[in-house]
Amino acid sequence: MTVRLPVIQGTLREGNETAVVADYTLERFRAHEEITSTLVNPGELGLGDLEMRLPKKDMLGETERSFVETVEAADGFAIVTPEYNHGYPGALKNVIDHIWEPWAHKAFGLVTVGGSVGGVRCEEQLRLVVNGGLNSQTVPRAVNVPHPADMFTDEGPADPDTWESRFDQLAEQLTVYARAMREVRDELTE
Ligand SMILES: Cc1cc2nc3c(=O)[nH]c(=O)nc-3n(C[C@H](O)[C@H](O)[C@H](O)COP(=O)(O)O)c2cc1C
């Protein structure tokens, strides 16, 4: 059974190093035949700072509607985000806060990017937001990427064996959870 797992990039900082990791996540997900995936880039959504949650779909422009439909149709997500000041970026929270129900009862895999500890502090914070705020479920595995410029280039990881295995393990676990959360949604909306 195919699962839909969009990859959400967590920053729109100019020249950010996370984009390469998000691209690699998408590439690894697409290597799994049971996963379909697309990249959601907050810089391309044109959401602006939150003034109100997005209204009904028939009142939305093309880009916003497509974003909502992508989240609605998803079984889960990978969030690929840098750590900023021991938290996650405001741009990511802004995207999350624009909608609510479509995030619920889905599986989330976290990929964090940072300095020496690879963004583990923002991983912990995101678990609180996803599991508590969004009524959803982070999977136990995460991928933490320290010093991304040393680990990844536009061509991919400097050490493919290490990173391929970490991302593939995340993809496999996320797939299992995403299928399970589909059943959870079915039961809860019966
Ligand atoms: C505003 C800002 C704050 C940051 N704070 C942290 C931090 O608290 N911990 C950390 O490990 N790295 C921190 N970094 C480093 C980033 O995690 C690092 O630059 C990494 O490459 C990912 O960020 P990027 O996608 O914006 O390039 C920070 C970077 C920026 C731009």
Image: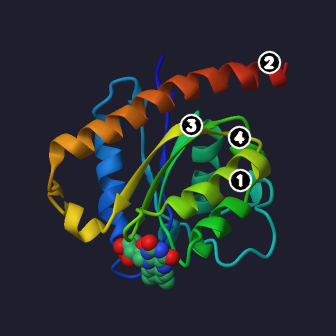
Q: Are marks 3 and 1 in contact (CB under 8 Å)?
A: no
Residue 86: image location, x then y, percent:
56, 73
For residue 161, above or below residue 59: above
Q: How many marks?
A: 4
Q: Which residue is mark 4?
A: 136
Q: Which residue is mark 1?
A: 128
**Amino acid beneath label 1:** Leu
Looking at this view, name the residue that lies furthest to the front. Answer: 116
- The front one of 177 and 127 is 127
Whole-angstrom CA distance, mark 2 to mark 1, is: 24 Å
Mark nearer the N terminus (1 vs 4)? 1
Residue at 59% across, 70% down: 87
Give the numbered dot on residue 93. none
> Between marks 3 and 1, how big is the CA–CA gap?
12 Å
Counting residues from the start of the chain, the first of labels 3 and 1 encountered is 1
Could you tell me residue 84's position as x and y percent?
52, 76
Helix, strand or loop under label 4? loop
Disc on res. 187:
2
Q: How far from the left and from the top, in percent, is residue 65?
A: 64, 55
Residue at left offset 69%, top offset 45%: 103
For the question of whether residue 65 can be seen, the reply is no
Q: Is residue 129 visible?
A: yes
Residue 165 vs 185, above or below: the answer is below
Amino acid type shown at disc 2: Glu
